[in-house]
Amino acid sequence: MKYILHVSAIVLIGISNSFSQSSDFEYGNNPKAGHYANVNGIKMYYEIYGEGEPLLLLHGNGGSIRGHSGRIEYFKDKYQVIAIDSRAHGKTEDIGDSLTYKNMTKDINDLLEYLNIDSCYIWGQSDGGIIGLRLAFDYPNKVKKLAVFGANLIADTTAIHPQLFTLVDKVLEVTTNNHEKRLMKLMKYQPQIRYDEISKIEIPVLIMSGDRDAIKLEHSVKIFNNIKKSNLFIMPGATHFGSYEKPDLFNLILEDFFSEPFNKTSTVEILINRYQ
């Protein structure tokens, strides 16, 4: 039983890396594109590809730059793509601290300051989406547009399917791996973001979810309803990892959101304007 739970934990926190795609070199371990920056008390690893307006990629819990390979391949001809390993992930330093989204968000702000980037486009997967949302209200000038897939504001069963909490609890009971334990505690107890905090976000936001996501659809809709300049995309036949399962569809939607002017005109507004 312990073996099964341990394997389940590895699958749960590292699954996004399994979607990495092959290329002429290894994303996440490319000396020509890789760099380190001392930010917020840690040594953070990042890679940069392409030229143009900056696009920052933020991975999920247990992930790393490796899971972004397909995204980098697609967008590096249009943007300057910046992919990072979050605190205690990948090649970024793990100082053994208590992981918090607030601290991880400051890491990103400090990295953007280090790179002299005034503002950028951001896509965040899961935990990366949580960090992106925090960045949008903690450091609003740093974000031009934000897209998040499978992000949640609170760590309870109103936002996340209860079976996942049961799995996390079982893993915490048996794991002897401190790093794994810290990642699981991050999922169990965080985030704790208020709706009035995201209501302060002024930049355009795209809320994305799979229709079979780990995050409940009603929670994603509630996030959408609390951000003034937001669009909503529910990917059909997709899980929490829909951005990897259906990359062509995902990339098309993401590119449209970043490249086109933001629009939230409703059907009601169109019909009233037409017939009044």
Image: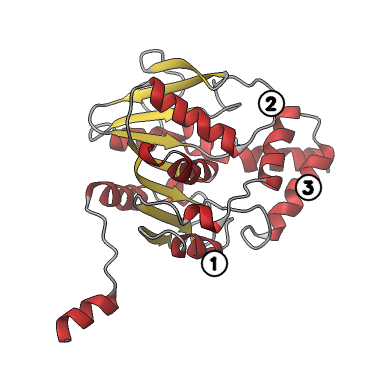
Where residue 263 appears, x then y in whole percent?
26, 61
The C terminus appears in which quarter of the rendering?
A: bottom left
Of residues 257 and 237, the one drawn nearer to the viewer in this rendering? 257
- Label 3 near label 1: C-beta < 8 Å? no
**Sooner in the amino-acid sequence: mark 2 or mark 1:** 2
Compare residues 206 and 248 and report the one nearer the observer.
206
Q: Secondary structure at mark 1?
A: helix
Image marks 2 and 3: residues in contact by CB distance under 8 Å: no
Provide the secondary structure element on which disc 3 rests: helix
The structure residue drawn at horizontal position 37% and vertical position 36%, both measured from the top left corner, is 142
In space, the residues marked 2 and 3 are separated at their CA atoms by: 21 Å
Q: Which mark is residue 97?
A: 2
Badge 3 is on which residue? Answer: 169
Q: Residue at x 22, y 53 (%)?
A: 261
Under circle 2, the secondary element is loop
Q: Quadrant of residue 43?
A: top right
Q: Position of residue 166 (x, y in %)?
A: 76, 53
Q: Quick one: which residue is furthest to the top in this view?
A: 31
Q: Is residue 109 above or below residue 131?
A: above
* Three-letter amino acid code at the position of disc 2: Asp
* Crowd band around label 2 with a 10 angstrom C-alpha radius: few (<14), some (14–19), many (20+): few
Q: Quadrant of the N terminus?
A: top right
Q: Nearer the viewer, residue 269 or 156?
A: 269
Determine the image quadrant of residue 51.
Answer: top left
Q: Determine which residue is flagged by label 1.
A: 218
